[in-house]
Amino acid sequence: MHKVIWFTIGAFLQGLAMAVFLFPHAIPSGGVAGIAILNDFFFHVPLALTLWIINFGLLLLAVKKLGKQTALWTIYCVAITSVTVDWLASLIQNPVNNIFFDVIYGAFIFGIGVGILFRYGASSGGMDILALIIAKWTGKKPGIILFWINSIVLLLTAITIGVEIILFAVLCQWMSTKIIDYVRTAQFQKKAKQYM
């Protein structure tokens, strides 16, 4: 039950960041989000549907490489994120703030959400699965690996939709991956109350 609560919070935060702060500016939060934005741009396919389809294929890889439990939790997290994106995208049509502030808020919230998922042993789907697999093989931090995977997709997205997006997308990736690695590894200690 403890994990379900944290996975729900993490996946919801991820969807919130994407739908409210990043997607209204066409800023992809990562590789699969970048592909979803391109798919919407060219073919008008709903963002949540693309997230589901791509994640399904990557989830099959997760079962084989990360184990059934991680894959099942990832399916749950992808469902929560996709429903959140679909719900909030229907409510939020226009950007909340200017692009700079929305990218900062979006990266911060996204990083916390994905960091929670990584901390408790799930993935948020998409390129996170590849990052976790590569991290398992190499022993490197998944946030750094995720940064490089996503940067390649972001570059393609920026070339297609607009070059100015690349700066904001890379800023978003850099900030969120730092927060992901911090939340994933931070040691939180409870301080005992002192009574006189």
Image (cartoon, helix red, strand yellow):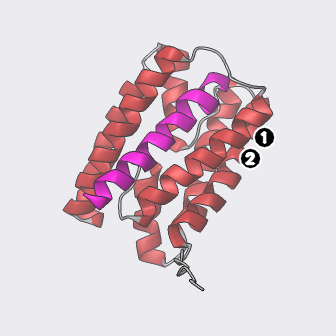
Tell me which residue sits at (67%, 25%) in the image.
Answer: 25
Tell me which residue sits at (68%, 21%) in the image.
Answer: 95
Q: Does residue 173 appear in this view?
A: yes
For this view, does 73 lie left or right of residue 33? left
Indicate whether 120 appears above or below 17. below
Q: Tell which of 20 and 155 is nearer to you.
A: 20
Q: Residue furthest front?
A: 196
For the magenta stretch, what is the residue range? 1-25
> Does the magenta segment cover residue 125?
no
Which amino acid type corresponds to the residue marked 1 in the rendered image? Leu
Magenta part mainly helix, strand or loop?
Answer: helix
Q: Tell which of 193 and 140 is nearer to you.
A: 193
For this view, does 165 lie left or right of residue 115? right
Circle 2 — which element? helix
Q: What residue would you read off at disc 1?
A: 167
> Does the magenta segment cover residue 21?
yes
Tell me which residue sits at (34%, 52%) in the image.
Answer: 5
Q: Quadrant of residue 122?
A: bottom left
Q: Position of residue 80 (x, y in %)?
A: 35, 38
Indicate whether 138 appears above or below 52. below
For this view, does 185 lie left or right of residue 72? right
Which is in the foreground here, disc 1 or disc 2?
2
For this view, does 196 lie left or right of residue 142? right
